[in-house]
Amino acid sequence: MRISLGHLEALVWVARLGGVSAAAEHLGLTQSSVSLRLRDLSDALGRPMFVRQGRGLHLTPDGSTTMAHAVLIIEQMEKLYENARPQKIAGTLRMGTSEAIAMAALPSIINRLAEAHPMLKLDVAIGTSADLERDLLAGNTDLALGINLHEDPRLKVLPLGEQRSTWLARADLQLPDCIRPRDIGHVPVLTNPSPSPMYQQTVNWFRTEGLSPHHISVSNSITVIAHMVAAGVGVAILPQRLVEKEIAAGEVVALRSEPAIETSLLSAAYRLDDWRPAINAALDVARAVIDDIHWLEPA
C-alpha cells in the first residue's frame, strides 16, 4: 500500500490534538476513517505510530520520526498549492511584537504588507515576551515576534537571529569604559518587569559576581527606560541598534562589560493549528524588513 497525504495528515493531527476524536473533528472525517488511516500507515511502515497512555495517544519513537517527516511534507504541499493556485490573501491577521521591533521595524512591516496584500488587515499588539506568548496561546493573536520565546508543543517557534544588547548610561555618571557588576552596584538600574528577557539579562549579569542591583526600577516600556537613562536617572541594558542615534549624538554612552551580556534570540511564533497563508505572508515581510535594517546577527 502506498502512503498518501491523508495518512500523514491523520498522524499529524492525532499527535497534535492528542486523540482520534479531536483529529477527526478537525479534518472533517469520521473517527473510524482516521483510525483506519493510522492503521494503514502503521501497516505500510511495519511499526506502530502510537501507544495508548491513559485516555490519550502518544507517539512512539518511530512515530515521532515519521511525524517530523510528515510535517515537512505537508508544509511543502501547502506551499505547492499556494503557488499553483495564487489567491488573494484577505481577512484580518493579529500580530504581536516586542516594543523594540515595533519601534525599529513596524511601520515598514505595515506598509510593505499593505502594498503586497491590500486586502489583508493587520491588527497589532505591542508587549513583553510574556504578553506575546500568553496572547498567542489564548488565541488573541495569530503571529508573535518576540525575544526568547519558549518552545511549546502548541506553537511553531522560528528563530530569526540574535538581538545584541549593551549597557547604556549618561556620560556624566563617569563609569569605567568596561564595567563589572561591582562597578555599578551603587547606580540605579532600570529594566522591564520580571520575568522579561531584559530583567533576566540584568539580574543574571549581576549574579556572575554573586551580586544583585542595589536599586532596581521597572517599566514595561523600553522607550521610557531609554529616556530615563538619557536623563541620568540610572543605567540599563538596551538593544544596541535601538540606541545608535543617541550614542552617536553623545546623549548616552555604550559601556563594554565583563562578563558579556547574555544575547537575546528574536523568534517568530504561531500556533501549529493555524496554517493560513496570511501568516506566511506577514512572516516573510517581517523577515525581509528586519534583514533590511540589519537588526539581528545570525544565531
Image: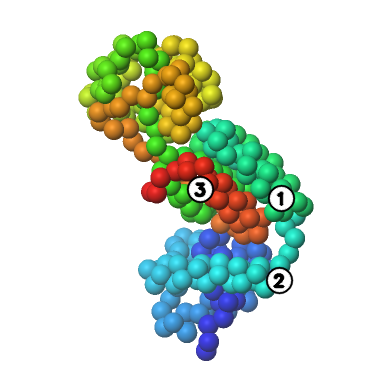
Classify 10 Å Cα crowding around label 3: few (below 14), some (14-19), many (20 and above): some
Vertical placement of 68 versus 89: above or below? below
Q: Give the mark, 3 or 1, whose residue is nearer the N terminus.
A: 1
How crowded is the residue under tag 1: few (<14 C-alpha within 10 Å), some, or many (20+)? Answer: few
State the residue in front, 220 or 253: 253
Is residue 216 in view? no
Q: What's the residue at 25%, 30% (across, down)? A: 259
Q: Which mark is residue 291?
A: 3
Residue 286: image location, x then y, percent: 58, 48
Q: Give the secondary structure at mark 3.
A: helix
Q: CA distance from mark 3 to mark 1?
A: 18 Å
Residue 228 rendering spot, x and y as whole percentages:
48, 15
Instruction: Using the image, tell me which numbered label, if any, was put on residue 132.
Output: none
> Outermost residue, front direction?
249
Could you tell me how far apart the alpha carbons at marks 1 and 2 are, in whole angstroms? Answer: 20 Å
Quickly name the residue at label 1.
115
Mark 3: which amino acid? Answer: Asp
Residue occupying the point 75% across, 51% down:
118
What is the quadrant of residue 280 in the picture? bottom right
The CA distance from mark 3 to mark 2 is: 28 Å
Question: x%, y% of residue 174?
Answer: 32, 12
Label 2: few (<14), some (14–19) or many (≥20) C-alpha neighbours in 10 Å: few
Residue kind at label 1, given as amino acid type: Glu
Per the image, the residue denoted by label 2 is 85
The answer to whether the residues at label 3 and label 2 have Cβ atoms under 8 Å apart is no
Q: Is residue 87 visible?
A: yes
Tag 2's secondary structure? loop
